[in-house]
Amino acid sequence: MNVRYGFCVMCLMLVAGTNGALSAPGKVSASHARIPNTTPLDAVKWTGGFWQDRMKRLGDIYLPETMDGMFQNPTNGASFRNFPRSLKLEEGGVIGRVWGDGDCYCILDAAARMVAYRQDEYCKAKLSYWIPQIAKCRNEIGLIDTWGMLIQTGEGGMEEGGKKQTHGCLHYNHGFLHAAALSHYQATGSRLFIDLADTTMGAYLTNKVNHGYMGDNIPQAYCSEYARSGNKRFMDATVAYYQKKSPFGPPLRDAQEIFGHGTFSLQYVTGATHLYGYTGDQELLGALRRLAQNTMLTKKYITGAVGSVAMGARPQQSVKGITYPGAKLTEAIGIGYDLPNDHGYNETCTLCLFMEWMYFMFQATGDAVYMDEVERCLYNSVPGCVDLEHGKYFYANPQEQTASSKRVGSMYENVTGHWIQKQFTWRRTSPMRVACCPPKVLRALARSAEMAYSVNEEGCWVNLYGNNTLNVQLPWGGSVEFQQKTDYPWDGKVELVVNKVESKKAFNIFLRVPGWVNASVSIRLNGKVIDTAAKSGAYSQVSRAWIKGDKIEMEFPMPVRFMAADQRIVDNRGKVAVMRGPVVYCLEGDDVPEGVPIENVRVPAAAVLRPVYTKELGGLVKLMGSLVYSTTATVSANKLSYAPTATTTYYEARFANSSKTMAQNDRLIAVSMIPYYARLNRSSDYFSVWLPVY
């Protein structure tokens, strides 16, 4: 039976997890959200496969190399060293950018999550070292601003700025301070960091610090403070905030499209999604659904990336008889279907924040379409931002790199040294001129455990698939322990076993059938088929009084699929992308014969690519087969039959010409394709997601 979506009212208080981690505490619940965030940070453990490997790399490689390497380097865009310098414990001026404190806090957020996940001693030590120093950096009004402190003592930095400029990023910094402190409290039970955050948020509210919507994650912090304290002033300030201007042109509730700087706009809508949980404002939810739909259908790449605009403009808009002027945009979400491949900007921050917004939209609504987007990001855009073996990162994430790539588009093809050009590195780098991206990747990877399952009064929701265990308290009493066994995303077979259940009350287990599935899915309970047509893109509901040993089995068919794009995406006309399961593949220069440029590789209608597991690149399934090498074939939209009734941006391709004959001098070549996330970890600088049809 497929779940229909509505709203439930629930009020969960403080709950302990398996290792003492805490669920979201508070005096006020987000009662209008379908699935309030109440799962402790230590409830899920990845026990093998893709996500166990990613979490191990996060703890063993990415966090240490980033915290002790990149974020200690004086040439980096952000640095932990501003804290001891502010306290005169270290000589030297300010390092990095005015928003650098916030980036440091975001790394501490990921570190706190790692402590909850595996009681990580390295991360424990780093949190114990930095939190007391941060606490001592409060200024005269109770805020923390290392840039302001150092500039006022005459210590300059990478960019000039006075007190007014530093205040312009206090909202960004303090929003991440609060998020890190809350994760630390939930992971450890220690009040040291959260008490500091409570004090700074109170000072922020009392002093009415001037902050606009740009980069603003203060509303999320205010919602959390309201939930934890019951202080209505925080909620009043948040409601008032969303009655002001928006980055979209029209006010939020009237906006028809999402526009603006990727980071700023996504933090803006994420805060509004949190607000809905406390107010139940249906007009607000309607606007958020509309903007999410606009993003997913017109402004998102097949890999889950968003924010294609390096430099562009928001058009003038007329809504309800009011005209809203256009505006210039940078690093932004722009007009619909403007999704170039070689110079798509797709800032790493934006990719990670889009994934988080989709997760919070799922919590608000229970709608599987948002969790499908989370999965798309987790297996494609997000893990590809960081090097497999080192703490090195991309800032911009185009969908192809070839010898002729313009990197930033025609507007800059004759410009040298523009700051936007510098963000398009051909390889992941460390350190970075602007270092906001690495912390977002670390936190996004750490969130994988939190997002795998959800629990509410209706039951347990299985959101993500992978080898893992869940051990969590049920809202009505007792605990439940699940074990999931699967080789997902490389294989579609999933087994879920109930290892322990302390409640005799019947409850639901909701199983997400991914939206990419294009076939019937059977669900078996203890070997007996109970659902023969589970609907893709929805949750299937199984209800019973569960007992130890109960086993649910599913299998999602995983054929290799050639995908076409809406014709309004100019760069993809006459081209196909390759997917298997949730994974998007690319052709890389390492996987074609020597001397064959990937620009000259074509996909014939008869192409057959077979999945082969390899231990290369951390262990993955690559696709092997034959494609056509041609130096004369043209790229033409006429080589595909487009579906005029398609209601999605990307759908299975239909080849217009099924002929197996080839032109003279063209030939078949053996190729392999690898997942997009694994690109550029070997010798070649070249890859492409979209390949022309032969």
Image (cartoon, helix red, strand yellow):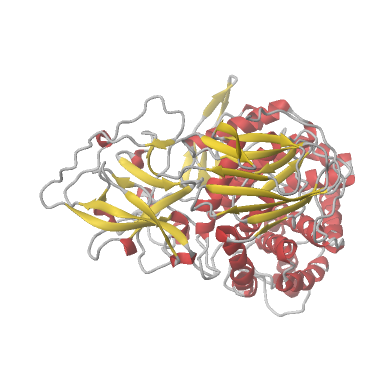
- Visible in this render: residue 471? yes
Name the residue at 76% across, 35% down.
458
- Please give left or right for residue 397 compared with residue 477 in the image: left
Quadrant (top left, top right, bottom left, bottom right) of the N terminus: top right
Name the residue at 13% across, 46% down.
663
Q: Which residue is at the front of the view, 675 or 92?
A: 675
Residue 85 in which image quadrant: bottom right
Q: Which residue is at the front of the view, 633 or 412?
A: 633
Name the residue at 55% across, 69% down.
391
- Please give left or right for residue 569 compared with residue 228 in the image: left
Q: Residue furthest left?
A: 664
Residue 141, percent from left and from top: 85, 57
Residue 411, percent from left and from top: 37, 48
Name the residue at 79% across, 71% down.
128
Residue 681, percent from left and from top: 43, 66
Residue 18, percent from left and from top: 80, 58
Q: Which residue is at the front of the view, 275 or 487?
A: 487
Quadrant (top left, top right, bottom left, bottom right) of the C terminus: top left
Q: Which residue is at the front of the view, 536 or 404?
A: 536
- Please give left or right for residue 581 compared with residue 264 in the image: left
